[in-house]
Image (spheres, helix red, strand yellow):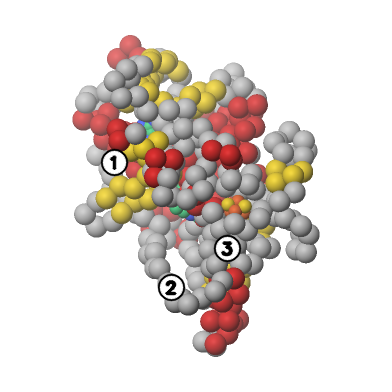
Amino acid sequence: MIGSGFGGSVTAHRLTEKGYRVAVMEMGRRWRAEDFPRTNWLIWRWFWRPRLALRGFFNMEFFRHVVILHGCAVGGGSITYANTLVVPPDLVWQNGSWAGLADWKTEMPAHFQTAMRMLGVIENRVMGPADHLLKRAAEAAGLGHTFYRTKVAAFQAPEGEEPGKTYPDPYFGGEGPDRTTCVGCGGCMMGCRFNAKNTLDKNYLYLAEKHGARVFAETRVVDVAPLSGKADGSDGYEVRTEKSTAWLAKHPQRFTCKGVVFAASALGSMDLLFRLKQNGSLPELSDQLGNRVRTNAESLIGVRIPGSREDLSKGVAIGSVLAAKLGVNPSLTICAVTERAMSYIPSAGETGWDDAAGIDAVAI
Ligand SMILES: Cc1cc2nc3c(=O)[nH]c(=O)nc-3n(C[C@H](O)[C@H](O)[C@H](O)COP(=O)(O)OP(=O)(O)OC[C@H]3O[C@@H](n4cnc5c(N)ncnc54)[C@H](O)[C@@H]3O)c2cc1C
Ligand code: SF4
């Protein structure tokens, strides 16, 4: 597995369950709740530019028309994301590159259910000052009926109960880690210092590791080539890595495996695949690579309320919305689509890969 974000963690968990030996290569670091920075002024613990000794979990890439914000850590984007999760409307499946690939409308509800259970998705119960203001603003604009609380992947106490209490695993019948209820600190995108956000290292990836998957942190994949020169990969692959946080001693390593899953996000996977096509390691990669790429089309707008006495950063990162059609919310959809793909994969030792209907649609 290349990458330990949503695609990589779901895949690692499900393949381990099916009896495969799984190694997850992740160029970011492993984080504990107590290691996250209190503020992003501590830039060396927030931003990812290892060449400048910045070894955080948050990355930015600047292109001509777009700026990409993305996570880089064990747990991928889940470490820095805002943990707002929405099931997309059915309309999405009828459009663009999804259309006609599968009977999404019939198949997907069960996989969304599984993904939501695994990620512990609930309706937000922690309303911060900004949520109350947004509600008032919605009502003042005659849009009160369009205001609603978001669905979030965080462990929250029932309303009225004291936050910040630690409980034994509430999600996986005791197989998962202890969790602490959300204190509404508003720091979700800075990494949750309170062990409340349901990041992948607390669910999918946690279970994968528990069942035998090995996660190689600070390990960047730099090359993937078929063994014995067989371009179809029938003899397996050689994967070369180097230590992503090293300056000089790059600690190169070589792994061999039967199959490779590229789950290094849209940007990371394409970056690597283009290099592999150009350097001749995977020359037969399709010329379609890089076509039909899209962002999740977000615009970020800052709003100030001069003179406000309330700390508007409190609450969860995105606790409520107004008049919003959120479309495809990437993380939950990546999990659900990967769950679907994994449901077609036979267990280790069984045949049937060839019949794995829908596998060509996994390249999301
Ligand atoms: C600030 C912020 C807030 C967000 N909020 C939300 C939200 O509220 N809801 C939502 O649905 N989505 C949100 N997102 C988007 C979400 O994080 C991504 O859509 C999601 O993480 C993508 O999942 P992925 O599995 O494709 O890749 P990622 O989660 O990005 O994981 C890919 C991993 O691959 C690793 N990698 C890359 N290249 C290599 C390599 N060569 N070798 C080894 N490892 C490599 C990276 O370090 C990374 O950890 C947010 C993103 C950001 C940045
Ligand atoms: S609001 Fe604070 S405690 Fe709650 S999930 Fe976000 S970072 Fe964690």
As helix, strand or loop, the secondary structure at mark 2 comes to loop
Q: Is residue 153 above or below residue 223?
A: below
Label 3 to label 1: alpha-carbon separation? 42 Å
In the image, what residue type sits under mark 3?
Answer: Lys
Which residue is labeled 3 in the image?
A: 314
| Residue depicted at x 46% and y 19% | 258
In the image, what residue type sits under mark 1?
Answer: Leu
| Mark earlier in primary sequence (3, 1) | 1
Nearer mark to the viewer, of 3 and 1: 3
Q: Nearer the viewer, residue 211 or 156?
A: 156
Q: Residues within 10 Å of mark 3 (few under 14, many from 20)?
A: some
In the image, what residue type sits under mark 2?
Answer: Arg
Label 2 to label 3: alpha-carbon separation? 14 Å
CB at mark 1 closer than 8 A to ligand 1?
Answer: no
Residue 251 image offset from top left, x and y in percent = 36, 16
CB atoms of marks 2 and 3 within 8 Å: no
Residue 101 appears in the figure: no
Q: Is residue 323 above or below residue 347?
A: below
Residue 110 image offset from top left, x and y in percent = 64, 50
Residue 87 image offset from top left, x and y in percent = 57, 58
Residue 304: which numbered mark, if any?
A: 2
